[in-house]
Image (cartoon, helix red, strand yellow):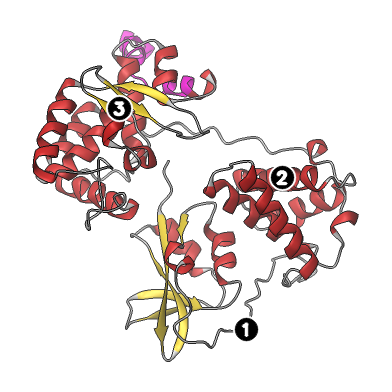
Amino acid sequence: MQKPIVKLTNVVHKNQSIIKLEFDKNLALYKLVRQLPHLNYSKTHGAWYLPYAGNTVEIICHALNNYAYIDYKALKNSKPQVQNLAAPLHLKLKVESGVVLAELSTQKLEEVNTFRQYMKSKRYSPNTIDTYVDALKLFLRYYNNINSTEITNQHLIEFNNAYILDQKLSSSFQNQIVNAVKLFYSTMQYKQLQPELVHRPKREKQLPNVLSKEEVKAILNALNNLKHKTMLSLIYSCGLRRGELLNLKIADISEQRGIILIRQAKGKKDRIVPLSPKIAAMLHSYYQVHKPKQWVFEGQDGTGTYDERSLQNVFKQALQKSNITKPATLHWLRHSYATHLLENGTDLRYIQELLGHSSSKTTEIYTHVSNKQLQKIISPFDTF
């Protein structure tokens, strides 16, 4: 399931710089946000906020990164509007010893920065770099009084038990910590810790969420805006991820060959997907009206790509107009595309290629939500 977005912006409130959190209505996310330390609500700004301190973003990422995508682009390109940053915020851990996470030492900050540069040089994606760095910082802050070279496997086990399990954090977050620590220690060549010997949690097996063909049709037909309808139709007709759609260039679409080239998608892999004749006709009409120059879907000012949050809102509005009450996200269209292909008789190997999955096991999960074979099974109840 696609994560909801939490947008962070820097504003002035009562003559102090604060970080405002903006997100769509989501009960689970709302409960997590309410647990943030030093959280307040501003009626003036109509949003929850935290004092702008040196580690505010880190605390927000730590608390929400496992459930939501944290968009802090606006903070990277701006400075606090009032130069009176709050003192560093401290996040207390729910453990018997009452541990409080201190700020990283200068030496550990240098190690983390070296680790970040290593990941950049290896061309890891920006999201992966941010996730691993945040996870590593949390682990090192927990053991801030211990030199990195002295941390052992036992420390990682204790961290899992005393922090992750005690706070009932997810298994995926636990795996993120192990992955980050493992990569860090293999990079820094510290031999005292061997993360490969630490037991990993079992992965949660969740089925993909799927819309029926009738529901997808209702969502697409609910849109009158040509640009919006073309975007969602392209996602469903080609099984695209959100970022793949927004990064599409006009040159990537070949109507003559009937294909779309998806460049450097997840895992830095290129792939080709077929271009539906109906989508080709829709794109032709869209080009005539909007006249994009480089990107297929440009931003409002005609430069750069279309905004991710705006695309989410387009899908949300389509759901409302079509009276579909399921908690669907954009990624459901991709899941639905794969499931409907399977139900139409498309070979699983082709579906794997179309989706860009490295392993066939990832694609096989759609066999569990396809109803084509299930409908052939007769319940013993019906034989009475």
Residue drawn at x 41%, y 86% is 13
Instruction: Please tell me whether residue 209 is drawn above or below residue 177 in the rendered image.
Output: above
Along the line of sight, the residue nearer the viewer: 249 or 234: 249
Label 3 amino acid?
A: Cys
Indicate yes or no whether the magenta region holds residue 271.
no
Residue 297 visible from this viewpoint? yes
Secondary element type, mark 2:
helix
Q: Position of residue 196 (x, y in %)?
A: 79, 36
Residue 284, image quadrant: top left
Q: Position of residue 252 (x, y in %)?
A: 31, 30
Spatial separation of the CA atoms under disc 2 and disc 3: 34 Å
**Location of mark 3 (residue):** 238
Instruction: Please tell me whether residue 38 is drawn above or below residue 301 in the rendered image.
Output: below
Spatial separation of the CA atoms under disc 2 and disc 1: 30 Å
Residue 226, image quadrant: top left
Residue drawn at x 75%, y 48% is 184
Q: Which mark is residue 178?
A: 2
Q: Is residue 124 left or right of residue 265?
A: right
Q: Position of residue 359 (x, y in %)?
A: 54, 21
- For the residues bearing labels 2 and 1, Cβ distance under 8 angstroms: no
Indicate yes or no whether the magenta region holds residue 364.
yes
Secondary element type, mark 1:
loop
Along the line of sight, the residue nearer the viewer: 311 or 153: 311
**Location of mark 1 (residue):** 87
- For the residues bearing labels 3 and 1, Cβ distance under 8 angstroms: no
Q: Is residue 270 left or right of residue 131?
A: left
Q: Is residue 315 left or right of residue 361?
A: left
Mark 3 Cα shell of 10 Å, populated few (<14), some (14-19), many (≥20): many
User: What is the span of residues highlighted in magenta in the rendered image?
Assistant: 363-384
Label 2 amino acid?
A: Val
Mark 1 Cα shell of 10 Å, populated few (<14), some (14-19), many (≥20): few
Closer to the chain start, of discs 2 and 1, is 1
